[in-house]
Amino acid sequence: MKKSNLKTVQFRDDINFAELVSDIARIKSDWLAPNAFDGLDDTSRDFLLMMLETGCRASDLTGLAPCDIVLDDPIPHICIGKSNTSKNPDSQRKVPLVGLSLAAANRHPDGFPDCRGYHTLAKLHRFFDQINLNPGSAPLLGFLRAQYHYRVVRGCHAGIPIVEEMMGWRCVYVLNKPTSLAERQRLATLIMYPVPPHLA
């Protein structure tokens, strides 16, 4: 692991910290452009947008059952670990849906069962290679998780316990009281990407 200049952040060795900073602007200008995902099917595109805006693992999202996608709640959210097999007990959490992830979930209220396995991830990698939108040196999934992590820390000014909760990591620093879903929604709203009309 290598440390950044942020006390609360550690990134894997294959994550370039500078790329995380510059790619926020690149995602806004390139990934969210009107024709950016031409040639990619809607399910794969929305699966990518869900990972981008929730920071969830691919396995978290492919394991969702329809009952885990709660869109009629005052705070729309997904329940990780309720029906699917999560990586560890700390991965079991409710993740608020905002912006791009809420729009994607509304289009796929039954989840993403067709994205199980490696074929969708391989398709995304090939697509990004073809259109030259690869997010730098890191693998796509590692980039998406690290990029969300970076946005939580910098955009929310969140400390380690809240970061661990929102990322679904094993909690080293335990909060006296878990962060409420409403507070997680507030934090997620602070860092969400704009939703262009064609992805709304």
Image: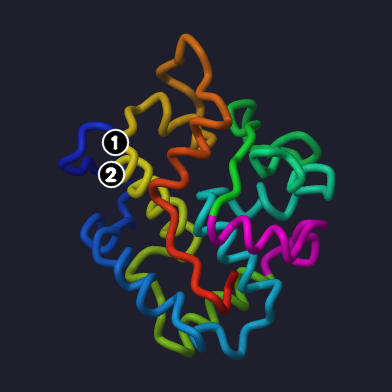
Q: Which sits in the foreground, 199 or 11? A: 199
**Residue at x 50% of width, y 85% of height:** 34
| Pointers 1 and 2 in contact (C-beta within 8 Å) | yes
Task: Tell me where residue 48 sits by quadrant.
Answer: bottom right
Q: Quadrant of the C terminus?
A: bottom right
Residue 65 got which mark?
none
Which residue type does callout 2 highlight?
Answer: Arg
Residue 127: percent from left, percent from top: 54, 83
Residues rendered magenta in the picture = 99-118
**Residue at x 83% of width, y 50% of height:** 66
Residue 154 got which mark?
2
Is 2 rendered above or below residue 52?
A: above
Which residue type does callout 1 highlight?
Answer: His
Give the side of residue 126 with respect to residue 72, left or right.
Answer: left
Quote the CA–CA distance across marks 1 and 2. 5 Å
Is 114 rendered above or below residue 87?
A: below
Task: Tell me where residue 8 sits by quadrant.
Answer: top left
Residue 177: percent from left, percent from top: 51, 13
Q: Which sits in the foreground, 186 or 6? A: 186
Mark 2, other Cα within 10 Å: few <14 / some 14–19 / many ≥20: some
Q: Which sits in the foreground, 37 or 198? A: 198
The majority secondary structure of the magenta stretch comes to: helix
Q: Is residue 147 magenta?
A: no
Q: What is the secondary structure assignment of the residue under circle 1?
A: loop
Residue 77: percent from left, percent from top: 66, 43
Identify the residue under disc 1: 157
